[in-house]
Image (cartoon, rainbow, N blue to C red):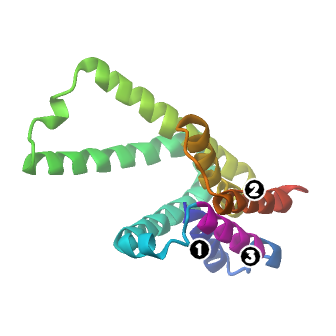
């Protein structure tokens, strides 16, 4: 969920235009809130997950580059077509990866599910990936990649709330404080817009 920060940095670099002090302060406050909300003060857990965190940051940078590039393209070719191209490319890459993994470990695993399960996989892909991504591209078309990145920083907090509501997860007071800080910052930043 760190990609919005990278979208803003890339946008600043590409457009050669500094972000406002208010936006920069919001990024710092949101990142501080997210740090608290996910329990980042636990240095033992941070040390144990350092290599994974590095790979996730690389992924976030790649995704941010994609969003900045697609932010310009979506105005030219439209959100639905851009979504179709992006999802098709991602599907082909994942299928290639799955085939590569399956040939080495368990060759028949990709074809071992029942037909109903493949239908279920398609429903999950549409509801959790295709439709939200289409909404995001349409939103970027209307408000731009920079502002969309700021607003999307609310995503981790919504995920945490989903865990509390549906998975019966419990948060510490510090985590609640972090969630509140993120919501308050983004609300204040976007209130007049």
Question: In the displayed structure, would residue 1 be above or below residue 115?
Answer: below
Question: In the displayed structure, would residue 182 be above or below residue 87?
Answer: below
**Residue hosting label 3:** 24
In the displayed orientation, state which residue is furthest to the top. 116
Is 32 within the magenta?
Answer: yes
Q: Quadrant of residue 124?
A: top left
Identify the disc placed on residue 183.
2
**Residue hosting label 1:** 10
Across and down, in percent, residue 173 comes to 68, 59
Q: Quadrant of residue 26?
A: bottom right
Start-end of magenta stretch: 24-37
Q: In the figure, is residue 157 to the left or right of 117?
A: right
Where does the C terminus fall, quadrant-wise?
bottom right
Q: Secondary structure at mark 1?
A: helix
Q: Which of these two is toward me, 33 or 153? A: 33
Q: In the figure, is residue 118 to the left or right of 28?
A: left
Sooner in the amino-acid sequence: mark 1 or mark 2: 1
């Amino acid at each position: 969920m760190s990609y919005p920060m990278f979208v803003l940095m890339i946008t600043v670099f590409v457009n050669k235009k500094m972000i406002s002090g208010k936006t920069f302060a919001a990024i710092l406050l949101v990142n501080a809130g997210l740090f608290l909300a996910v329990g980042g003060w636990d240095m033992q857990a941070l040390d144990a997950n350092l290599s994974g965190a590095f790979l996730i940051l690389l992924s976030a940078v790649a995704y941010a580059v994609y969003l900045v590039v697609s932010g310009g393209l979506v105005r030219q070719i439209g959100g639905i077509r851009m979504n179709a191209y992006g999802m098709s490319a991602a599907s082909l890459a994942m299928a290639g990866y799955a085939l590569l993994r399956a040939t080495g470990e368990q060759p028949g695993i990709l074809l071992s599910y029942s037909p109903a399960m493949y239908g279920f996989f398609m429903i999950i892909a549409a509801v959790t990936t295709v439709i939200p991504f289409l909404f995001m591209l349409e939103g970027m078309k209307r408000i731009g990649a920079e502002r969309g990145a700021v607003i999307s920083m609310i995503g981790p907090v919504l995920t945490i709330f989903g865990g509390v509501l549906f998975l019966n997860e419990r948060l510490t007071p510090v985590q609640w404080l972090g969630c509140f800080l993120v919501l308050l910052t983004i609300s204040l930043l976007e209130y007049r817009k």
